[in-house]
Image (cartoon, grey):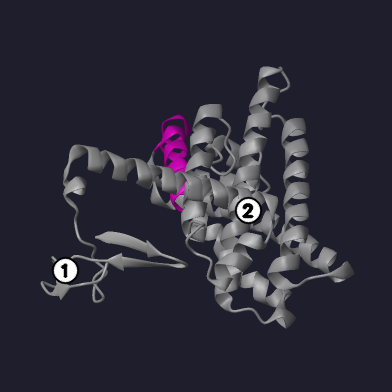
Amino acid sequence: MERTQGPGSSAVRVTPWTCPSCHEGVSTPFCPRCGEAPVSPREQTLKGLAERLVHAFTSIDSKTARSIWALVRHPGFLTVSWMKGVRQIYVRPITLFLVVNVLFFALQSLTGEAVFSSTLDSHVHHQDWQAFASAMLQRKLEASGMSVESYTPVFDNAVGVHAKSLIILMTAPFALLLPIVFLRARRPFLTHIVFSLHVYTFQLLVFCLAMLAARASAWAGLGGLEAPMVDTVLSVFNLAAFGTYLYLAIGPAYGASGAWRALQAAVLAIAAAAVMLGYRFALFLITLLTT
């Protein structure tokens, strides 16, 4: 394949080749039927393979970094861009969510702080549903014949696995709430799904900061997330950051403005906090019933 340039224009001269998938002669840079490209001799060398690998990884990293920067720096912009069809310079919403999710749980493992995967002791003694959890646990132990001491590590290990694999479920109720809050905006439902994924991706990033702050607090002797004061302060910080982000994001994403915009952001922030509590409770039930 050769590229020749003339004044004010460029042209590509392609050596005819046979598509390995369609087995037909092709005279264009890509097969018009399946999209295959001709394999150059350089690609079949180790140097060529190394170049392609480097390009692939740096391309993914740059797109991910660009997407995270757009998500944080310009709330709502990433959703608008994706819905307009800007797809090549940003990673997909679900991919971005999963990448940040991996970062979140890796950081949780490093810091030892648990945001979603609350331990059995936490459910029984520190959560809002502690009375219900205690009763359910008692029935579980009576039916299985296990002791609290033997069952606790089983539950704690399983709830960590469930927290990682089911976290995307939090985006569903939030996405279902959006068309109700923004009924007049009349956005396609895909907009609500994309916006919900972006919002919860941002929330995971905020939780990453909160875990680092909790670990720094623990090193300072004030305790981590298990300390009521630290948990309260970081919960207020998370809610404030999330509410502010929502206020900024729903402007470009949904055209919200004025005092009504502040009310909508407040409703969504409270709803997101309720969804998170519901997710913790759901994890307790799922883990208890499957272990």
Magenta highlight range: 146-166
Q: Which residue is mark 2?
A: 71
User: Looking at the rendered structure, which numbered label has been put on residue 16?
Assistant: 1
Q: Main secondary structure of the magenta part?
A: helix
- Residue 183 or residue 252, whichever sits in front: 252
Tell me where residue 282 sits by quadrant.
bottom right
Asked if the magenta segment contains residue 158, the reply would be yes
Residue type, numbered disc 1? Pro
Vertical relation: 188 (above or below) 285: below
Tell me where residue 84 sits by quadrant.
bottom right
Measured as percent of width and height from the top left, residue 24 is found at 12, 74
Label 1 crowding class (10 Å Cα cut-off): few <14, some 14-19, many 20+?
Answer: few
Tell me where residue 147 sits by quadrant.
top left
Vertical relation: 157 (above or below) 189: above
Q: Please tell me whether mark 1 sits on a helix, a strand or a loop.
A: loop
Residue type, numbered disc 2? Leu
- Residue 159 or residue 129, whichever sits in front: 159
- Of pointers 2 and 1, the one earlier in the residue sequence: 1
Asked if the magenta segment contains residue 281, the reply would be no
Q: Which residue shows up at 49% across the image and 64% down it? A: 87
Measured as percent of width and height from the top left, residue 182 is found at 72, 75
Instruction: Say if residue 163 shows up in the picture.
Output: no
Q: Point out the image quarter for the N terminus.
A: bottom left
Measured as percent of width and height from the top left, residue 21 is found at 15, 68
Residue furthest out toward the right: 259
